[in-house]
Amino acid sequence: MMLIASDHGALELKESIAAFLTERGIDFKDCGAYDAASVDYPDYAEKVAGPVSRGEAERGILLCGTGIGISIAANKFPGVRAALATDAFMAEMAKVHNNANILVLGGRTTSPEKGREIVAAWLDASFEGGRHQGRLDKITAIEQRFCR
Ligand code: RB5
């Protein structure tokens, strides 16, 4: 299952990405926000990063105005690898090298068309493993030392 959420800074882009996921036949749940009222991005990071961290959801997409705040918040959750991408190459590499389980986009930096390209690149890529797995293992080791 995929989860998607955004704050008020990326509602329009979230709607466009949600429509794209539906077109692609991807099963997902929209965790809000559902209107333009000002909200706090850490609350929306938690709606996706919490379940991904606990193994209750496989992957997610998060959005805020720039994608920066919600990335910072999501990456506090153990096991979450949230990657902000502003183009398709970054999104592809986020999966191929970093096995990002959450893709992050910025509603004020990314057009709906570009957003779809970014999401498609992440969905269509595969983690390469090998030396990259060793690096992810080091990130996990850091979490184990500091996040108790
Ligand atoms: C909200 O105005 C804005 O700060 C937020 O969407 C995001 O850009 C934070 O990083």
Image (tube, rainbow, N blue to C red):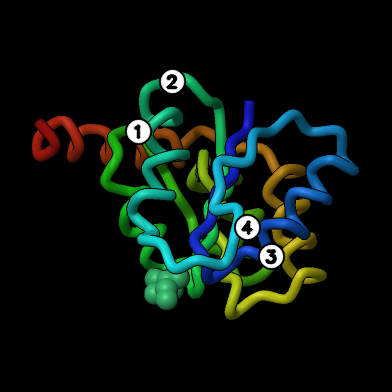
Question: Amino acid under label 2?
Answer: Gly
Q: Earlier in the sequence, mark 2 or mark 4?
A: 2
- Disc 4 is placed on an element classified as helix
> Looking at the image, do the residues carrying marks 2 and 4 touch, with CB atoms under 8 Å apart?
no
Quarter of the view holding residue 35: bottom right
Q: Residue at x 70, y 64 (%)?
A: 88
Label 3 neighbour load within 10 Å: few <14, some 14-19, many 20+: many
Residue that badge 2 annotates:
55
Q: In the rendered image, which residue does mark 3 sit on?
A: 13
Crowdedness near tag 1: few (<14), some (14–19) or many (≥20) residues, C-alpha within 10 Å: many
Note whether 37 is above or below 99 in the view shown: below
Q: Earlier in the sequence, mark 3 or mark 4?
A: 3
Residue that badge 1 annotates:
79
Report if the CB atoms under discs 2 and 1 are less than 8 Å apart: yes
Label located before the other in sequence (2 or 1): 2
Gap in angstroms between the C-alphas marked 4 and 1: 19 Å
Alpha carbon separation for disc pair 2 and 3: 26 Å
Front residue of 127/34: it is 34
Q: Quadrant of the N terminus?
A: top right
Residue at 56 percent of width and 34 percent of height: 59
Considering the numbered disc 2 on the image, is that residue within a helix, a strand or a loop? loop
Q: Earlier in the sequence, mark 2 or mark 3?
A: 3
